[in-house]
């Protein structure tokens, strides 16, 4: 058993209650850390995407001379 994310269901069931709770806790902490990482990534991509869209709007206005 290298970590809680790679054990089978049968292995999990055979563990003591305290070990099961510890594995579930570690998995939850790992999941929360991964979600935080994605939030930062999506914020950055939203900022970059917004800048690109604003740039495209400016270019279209210049091209159409509105």
Image: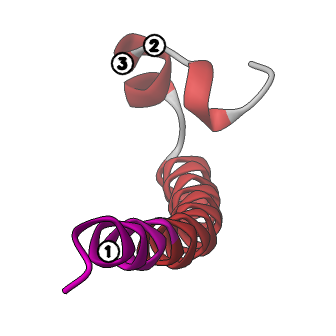
Residue that mark 2 sits on: 8
Q: Does 30 sit left or right of 15 as displayed? A: right
Q: Which residues are magenta?
A: 52-66
- SS assignment at label 2: loop
Location of the N terminus (image quadrant): top right
Q: Determine the secondary structure under disc 3.
A: helix
Write down the quadrant of residue 56 in the picture.
bottom left
- Write the residue at 59% across / 73% down: 36
Q: Give the Cα distance between marks 3 and 2.
A: 4 Å
Query: In front: mark 1 or mark 2?
Result: 1
User: What is the chief secondary structure element of the magenta stretch?
Assistant: helix
Q: Name the residue that disc number 3 marks.
A: 9
Q: Residue at x 61, y 49 (%)?
A: 19
Image quarter where the C terminus lies is bottom left
Q: Residues within 10 Å of mark 1 (few under 14, many from 20)?
A: few
Query: Is the residue 61 above or below the residue 10 in the image?
Result: below
- Residues at badges 3 and 2 in contact (C-beta under 8 Å)? yes
Label 1 sits on a secondary structure element that is helix
Question: For residue 57, which numbered disc appears in the image?
Answer: 1
């Amino acid at each position: 058993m290298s970590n809680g994310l790679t054990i089978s269901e049968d292995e999990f069931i055979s563990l003591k209650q305290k070990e099961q709770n510890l594995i579930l806790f570690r998995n939850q902490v790992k999941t929360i850390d991964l979600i935080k990482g994605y939030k930062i990534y999506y914020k950055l991509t939203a900022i970059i995407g917004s800048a690109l869209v604003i740039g495209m709007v400016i270019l279209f206005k210049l091209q159409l001379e509105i």
